[in-house]
Image (tube, rainbow, N blue to C red):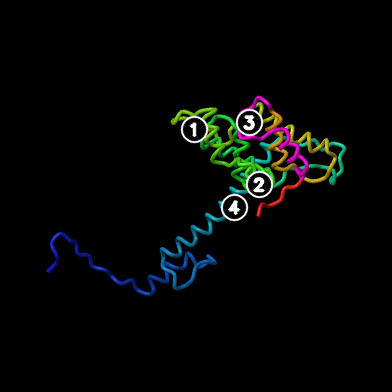
């Protein structure tokens, strides 16, 4: 007698010939094994395809971020003399854009670039900030206090355009590296000092509020060509 309230279903065994015919379309997948079920093979194929798509998207994101950063003038310079953005400075910039989007700001300002350096976290600049008591959570709270929150129904663009002070901060980083005449990359420290150079910017005001001053900027400038991993 069937239990009241429960439906009783009959299960029909699948013949071995039928099972084999179902597995044939997936024999080309390197992740498929004969013991895999039809569902398992389908998931395996989807995961392989999704990893390929994810890899392409990462490459596209890096290319987009690189084009968003200021171009570096290389006319008349040898390959050894040409400067380029370091991997950590590019990631810091990308994290700055993401922070601007999280706060639903229409632009990427100097305050977002500052947060990006701290989110990336492995550069000499990020280490220097933390050693001086300037952390991501403190900066983020101060950004909200200084600038406020955006409308909850506003959605930032995928790549919020730079504000004028933020653009000037990045331009300063490029120019300062080229003026030094030294080989190497433009680091996150160059970006941080570029933010500090914009006296009226939100990033500069936030740094000053946490005790960052010209003396600390000069101390950081001594090693700004280094971009080591923080351990």
CA gap, disc 2 and disc 4: 30 Å
Q: Are marks 4 and 3 in contact (CB under 8 Å)?
A: no
CA gap, disc 4 and disc 3: 27 Å
If you read the primary sequence from the N terminus, does the residue marked by circle 4 or circle 3 appear first? 4
Q: Which mark is residue 155?
A: 1
If you read the primary sequence from the N terminus, does the residue marked by circle 3 or circle 1 appear first? 1
**Residue 122: image x %, image y %?**
65, 49
Which is more toward the observer, 103 or 141? 141
**Where's the C terminus, which quadrant?**
bottom right
Q: Which residue is mark 3?
A: 162
Which is more toward the observer, 177 or 20? 177
Q: Nearer the viewer, mark 1 or mark 2?
A: 2
Q: Are marks 1 and 2 in contact (CB under 8 Å)?
A: no
CA gap, disc 4 and disc 1: 26 Å
If you read the primary sequence from the N terminus, does the residue marked by circle 2 or circle 4 appear first? 4
User: Callout 1: helix, strand or loop?
Assistant: loop
If you read the primary sequence from the N terminus, does the residue marked by circle 2 or circle 3 appear first? 2
Q: Which mark is residue 55?
A: 4
Q: Nearer the viewer, mark 2 or mark 4?
A: 2
User: Callout 3: helix, strand or loop?
Assistant: loop
User: Callout 2: helix, strand or loop?
Assistant: helix
Q: Residue at x 28, y 70 (%)?
A: 12
- Determine if the magenta segment contains residue 20: no
User: Callout 4: helix, strand or loop?
Assistant: helix
Q: Are marks 4 and 1 in contact (CB under 8 Å)?
A: no
**In the picture provided, is 58 more to the left or to the right than 3?**
right
The magenta span reads 199-225
Quarter location, residue 188: top right
């Amino acid at each position: 007698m069937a239990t009241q309230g429960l439906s009783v279903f009959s299960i029909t065994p699948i013949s071995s010939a039928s099972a084999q015919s179902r597995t044939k379309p997936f024999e080309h997948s390197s992740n498929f094994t004969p013991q895999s079920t039809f569902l398992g093979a389908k998931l395996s194929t989807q995961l392989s395809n999704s990893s390929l798509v994810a890899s392409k998207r990462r490459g596209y994101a890096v290319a987009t971020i690189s084009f968003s950063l200021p171009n570096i003038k290389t006319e008349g310079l040898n390959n050894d003399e040409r400067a380029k953005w370091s991997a950590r400075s590019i990631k810091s910039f990308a994290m700055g854009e993401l922070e601007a989007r999280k706060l639903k700001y229409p632009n990427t300002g100097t305050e977002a670039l500052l947060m990006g350096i701290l989110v990336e976290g492995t550069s000499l600049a990020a280490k220097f900030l933390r050693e001086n008591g300037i952390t991501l959570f403190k900066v983020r709270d101060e950004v909200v206090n200084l600038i406020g929150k955006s409308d909850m129904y506003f959605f930032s663009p995928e790549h919020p355009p730079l504000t004028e002070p933020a653009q000037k901060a990045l331009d300063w980083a490029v120019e300062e590296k080229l003026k030094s005449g030294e080989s190497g990359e433009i680091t996150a420290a160059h970006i941080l000092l570029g933010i500090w150079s914009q006296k009226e910017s939100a990033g500069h005001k936030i740094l000053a509020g946490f005790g960052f001053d010209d003396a600390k900027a000069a101390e950081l400038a001594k090693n700004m060509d280094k971009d080591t991993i923080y351990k």
